[in-house]
Amino acid sequence: MNHKLNIWRQKNANDKGKFYTYEVSGVSPDQSFLEMIDELNDDLTRKGEDPVHFDHDCREGICGACSMVINGHAHGPKGLITTCQLHMRSFSDGEEITIEPWRAKPFPVIKDLVVDRTPMDRIIQAGGYVSVNTGGTPDANAIPIAKHLADTAMDAAQCIGCGACVATCKNASAMLFTAAKISQLAVLPQGNAERANRAEKMIAVMEEEGFGGCTNTGACEVECPKGISLEHIARAHREYMSAKFSSHNV
């Protein structure tokens, strides 16, 4: 397979950046998208040119580090996968492919396709935790949890914090990510200790970091590699309003 790649190159957050075009040939349809870029970088290195910088880690669809917008889609044209799980057989031979970084003000470009996503870490630090005793390990069945609540928590916990929702949203909103982290703990008894303030604090930090507001277009749910539902945003709003009117905040 042969492809023309239009790749965004940018030295740092202050550089204007622009697209560069590269030709790749002999690409196997069974290669992953990242393996294809690895081969391109090998070729650039042999020529003495600067390789394309991009994030990656586990390459197993777990960490979400492989953040790229490919032909206008976060993580590429296939649904429910990360970029590292995208294979070249998803493209036609000779197809032109455009590759960009996450586009959002809170995600400044570090270099090329690498962006700084630490604002999402600060949202977690604001309230994405539970208070637990530091004594002996509790029995796994010590706190009974209804299956439907456990399932809801596990669905929300699938969020890997990749930022695809932000990159996809026209407002660069991080509401789906924030809501998933709020919802994950809100339905469990272990999350009750911080429940009154969690949503209020996390959403406040989200806004301070410069993420846009949610207008419920649903693009985030469509592009999310883990299929996080918009239902969690509704729950986060309920948690937020409850916190605002809670006696703990009077």
Image (tube, grey):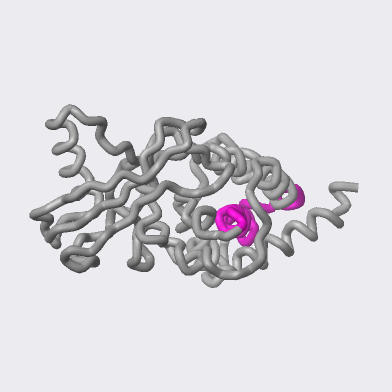
Q: In what quadrant of the picture does the N terminus appear? A: bottom left
* Residue 235: x %, y % from top left: 67, 65
* Residue 51: x %, y % from top left: 25, 34
Does 141 sit left or right of 58 as displayed? Answer: right
Q: Residue at x 17, y 27 (%)?
A: 48
Image-quadrant location for residue 133: top right
Query: Which of 189 and 94 lies nearest the eye of the viewer?
Result: 94
Tell me if residue 111 comes above or below residue 212 in the rendering: above
Residue lying farthest to the left in this orientation: 26
Q: Is residue 231 magenta?
A: no
Image-quadrant location for residue 106: top right
Tell me if residue 12 comes above or below residue 228 in the rendering: above
Residue interval drawn in magenta: 171-197
Does 239 sit left or right of 31 as displayed? Answer: right
Q: Residue at x 40, y 39 (%)?
A: 114
Q: Mostly what secondary structure, the magenta segment? A: helix
Query: Which of 186 and 106 lies nearest the eye of the viewer?
Result: 106
Residue lying farthest to the top in this orientation: 48
Residue 129, visible in the rendered structure = no
Q: Residue at x 47, y 55 (%)?
A: 164
* Residue 138: x %, y % from top left: 52, 46
Tell me if residue 76 comes above or below residue 53 in the rendering: below
Does 155 sit left or right of 31 as displayed? Answer: right
